[in-house]
Structures are given as C-alpha cells and as structure tokens.
Image: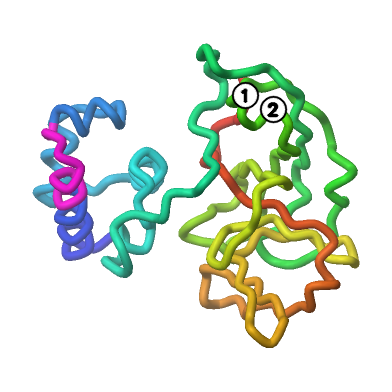
Amino acid sequence: MSKNLERAIGKRIKELRKALGLTQTAFAEKLGRSKRSIQEWESGRNEPSERVLRLIEQTFNVNPEWLREGKGEMFLPKPKSNLEFLGAIPFDFVLMPVPVIDQRVGAGRGLYTAMSEPSEVKFVWVPKKYADHRLFFFRVFGDSMKPRLQNKDWVVADLDSSVQNGDLAVVELSNEEIMVKKYRKKREGYIILESYNPDYEPIVVKPEEIKNIAKVVLIVPNGETPWG
C-alpha cells in the first residue's frame, strides 16, 4: 500500500471515528485494538491490515468503497433484518438448526449443489424473531464481489426476508446455478445480478429463471466460523 493511500485511509478512519462520536480509546476498545494503533493509522505512520479494514466495516456498517477509495456514502444502509450476534446466548435468543452449504456458493459463476441439499446442519443461537425464518449459512468462493465479499467469507441468507433493489442476495437459478450478487430489478421485467468487481459482467435473467432467492443478512469474514 502506498504512503498516500495509507494517509487517505487513515484520514477516513479519523473522519469515521469523529462521525461516531468516539474517542481514540473508545474506538480502539470496540475493535479490540490499542489506542496507539488508532493513532498510527490516523497519522498514516502505519497501515491497517486487510483484516482490520474488514473488522471496521463489519463493526460500524461502513461502506467498503468509502473506507478504501473514498467513494460513496460513509455507511451502508442498515438492513431491515440483521443478525447482530451469533455464538452468544443473550436472553432473547433461541438455539435452532441452520443448514450449511459449504464450498458450493460462487461469487463468480458455476454449477453447485441446490439450496435444498445442505452439506450439514449446525445448531446456533439466533434472535427469537428469526426462529420461524428459513436461514442458511453459505460459504462464498471467488472474487467477483470484492471488496464487499472476500473469498471464503460466510454469509447468512434469509429466504423469508424480502429482497429489495440493491440488496445482497444468494440466488439459485432454475439450472441450479447459485451465486451471491447485488439484486436489481429493471422496469422491463428483467433481473440484473451485479458484481462489485468491475471485471465481471452483470448477469441478466428473467424472473421465472430464479428458483430461490435469499437476502444476505449477515457477513462473517474469512477465518472465522459462524458457530461455536
């Protein structure tokens, strides 16, 4: 990472911290880092790692394009339904089985096992309000959704939450092709499945070609597991 880029990201980290109304100490505590680390990032003396950048994005719902490139709004739109904790056991959570599809969902294109054929089922704690929802864990492979999604990230998708324009969704087509894309519905009746990575062309399908669609309600970064 160049020094100019380091300083630009450090400047945006400082801008984010002030927008949140947090001191360097409070900001550091929320990220599990030291105050000195925050000072070094903000001054440009040291660069935050990729893992730290993604931690900042996840913790504060920050737009990755804004944090890394200064593009767009500072924060992502807050989803209507969001699993705030997994692996914790607060009062209003319930233990329930959630199917897992591992090494099957693509951030590019390819044929994969159908949503109805999970590789395993894990018991995890989820908010009671989602107890009657059809939730799935998916592991993403590929780079078409960078920087929002990285290779081997986990996502939690909800088949019972409505998918709106601009939402991330796991989409299963009638040919059993499954992918994670940004959902767009055009007036002409076509569905556009967009990638964040500009190297990938949008995928255009008809509504009847979509077999299943599930809204992504949580992203769990690579290297972590969404269950205990």
Query: In the rendered image of this protein, does residue 224 appear above or below residue 166?
Result: above
Assign a secondary structure to mark 1.
helix
Q: Is 166 rendered above or below residue 206?
A: above
Would you say 45 lies left or right of 162 here? left
Relative image position of residue 17 (x, y in whole percent):
18, 43
Tag of residue 88: none
Question: Left or right: where does residue 84 sit relative to residue 14?
Answer: right
**Which of the two residues, 54 or 214, is positioned nearer the viewer here?**
214
Residue at 70% x, 52% y: name it: 214
Say which of 84 and 27 sits in front. 84
Q: Residue 12 location, x and y as percent? A: 19, 55
Q: Are marks 2 and 1 in contact (CB under 8 Å)?
A: yes
Q: Secondary structure at mark 2?
A: loop
* Magenta residue check for 22: yes
- Residue at the image point whose x is 62% and y is 24% from the top: 128
Q: Position of residue 181 (x, y in %)?
A: 63, 63
Q: Residues within 10 Å of mark 2 (few under 14, many from 20)?
A: some
At horizontal 72% and vertical 36% (from top left) the residue drawn is 133
Place of residue 199 in the rendered image (x, y in percent of width and height, measured from the top left): 56, 77
Identify which residue is drawn at 30% across, 26% down: 32
Mark 2 and mark 1: Cα distance apart in space: 5 Å
Quadrant the C terminus occupies: top right
In reply to whether residue 76 is colored magenta, the answer given is no
Q: Residues within 10 Å of mark 1 (few under 14, many from 20)?
A: some
- Magenta span of residues: 14-24
Main secondary structure type of the part rendered in magenta: helix
- Say which residue label 1 marks: 128
Residue 49 sits in quarter: top left
Type of amino acid at the residue the image marks with label 2: Ala
> What's the mark number on residue 131?
2
